[in-house]
Amino acid sequence: MSNARQAIKAARDATGPATPASLIEAESLLNRAEDNLQKRAYKQARRDAIAARGKAAEALSSTRTVDDRNGAS
């Protein structure tokens, strides 16, 4: 879950004022993972945390792609 939090933070820090849908989804998945953890649904919490990390990576990648197209460094 820590990896998901870190990935979301990196994506959030890299995005401008417009939040990509994949980042919103990552945050939602992380919230669901935390809820499942409290309910002791460990397997589902792990799945959601892994999915959240993946969506955050997708958001970060799309942000970097847009920056590359715009010539930002």
Image (cartoon, grey):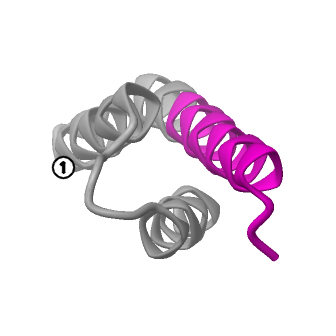
The C terminus appears in which quarter of the rendering?
A: bottom right
Tell which of 27 and 40 is nearer to you. Answer: 27
Label 1 sits on a secondary structure element that is: helix
Q: Is residue 45 left or right of residue 69?
A: left
Residue 57 versus residue 22 in the image, above or below: below
- Residue 36 place in picture, x, y as percent: 25, 35
Instruction: Let me know if residue 59 is in the magenta part.
Output: yes
Q: Please, what is the three-letter code of the amino acid marked with disc 1?
A: Gln
**Residue at numbered disc 1:** 38
Q: Is residue 38 left or right of residue 64?
A: left
Residue 53 versus residue 43 in the image, above or below: below
Q: Residue furthest front?
A: 71
Identify which residue is drawn at 56% across, 45% down.
56
Instruction: Let me know if residue 7 is in the magenta part.
Output: no
Which region is colored magenta?
A: 50-73
Identify which residue is drawn at 43% across, 23% down.
44
- Residue 45 place in picture, x, y as percent: 42, 35
Q: Determine which quarter of the picture holds residue 53.
A: top right
Q: Is residue 70 left or right of residue 38?
A: right
